[in-house]
Image (cartoon, helix red, strand yellow):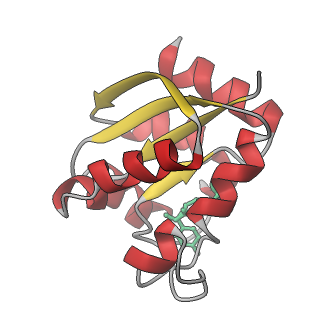
């Protein structure tokens, strides 16, 4: 069964939207098989966001992602990697369609509430990174 790594971000914690995100995952029919709340540090963010580490806005990502707890989850289901990206919506909350998590709750492309792996291969790497 396919798996993906989903992580609510600190804005979801601050705004009380962790439950809403979990509900949407469950309503879609996926199974959450593991879950933990964590506080991330810069070192793990440099690894997790390696594709962005040399961008000028990377320090802002670190500030945002260390501003409160995240909830990491392993989510399982048929085609769950693409399916979760679909219910999350695109990165930028302004462009994300209504009905998606980001489209309904995020206003821009930085504080967008939730992370989801972008490929089956990266899902397994990210699950190992956060769950060992
Ligand atoms: O999260 P997603 O896979 O949709 O996008 P990404 O391109 O992998 O970027 C990871 C995260 O970095 C985004 O979800 C945003 O929180 C942040 N980001 C940002 O703040 N500004 C950008 N121009 C691009 C990404
Ligand atoms: Mg990404």
Camera-side residue of 62 and 71: 71
Compared with residue 50, is residue 120 higher up or lower down, i.e. above or below?
A: above
Asked whether the viewer can see residue 63, the reply is no
**Residue at 57% of width from left, 49% of height from top?**
28
Instruction: Choose top left, top right, bottom left or bottom right for residue 61.
Output: bottom left
76 relative position to 32: left or right = right
Instruction: Choose top left, top right, bottom left or bottom right for residue 35.
Output: top left
106 relative position to 76: left or right = left
Q: In the picture, which quadrant includes the N terminus?
A: top right
In the rendered image, residue 62, in percent from the top left (x then y), is placed at 39, 54
**Residue at 42% of width from left, 33% of height from top?**
72
In the rendered image, residue 125, in percent from the top left (x then y), is placed at 70, 26
68 relative position to 76: left or right = left
**Residue at 63% of width from left, 58% of height from top?**
52
**Residue at 59% of width from left, 80% of height from top?**
96
Compared with residue 131, is residue 76 higher up or lower down, i.e. above or below?
A: below
33 relative position to 106: left or right = right
Asked whether the viewer can see residue 92, the reply is yes
């Amino acid at each position: 069964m396919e798996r993906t790594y989903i992580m609510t971000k600190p804005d979801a914690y601050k705004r009380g939207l962790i439950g809403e995100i979990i509900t949407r995952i469950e309503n879609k029919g996926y199974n959450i098989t593991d879950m933990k709340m964590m506080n991330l540090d810069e070192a793990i963010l440099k690894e997790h966001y390696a594709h962005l580490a040399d961008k000028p806005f990377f320090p802002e990502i670190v500030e945002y992602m260390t501003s409160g707890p995240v909830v990491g989850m392993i989510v399982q289901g048929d085609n769950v990697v693409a399916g979760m990206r679909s219910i999350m919506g695109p990165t930028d909350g302004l462009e994300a369609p209504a009905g998606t998590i980001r489209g309904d709750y995020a206003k821009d492309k930085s504080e967008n509430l939730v992370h989801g792996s972008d490929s089956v291969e990266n899902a397994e790497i990210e699950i190992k990174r956060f769950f060992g």
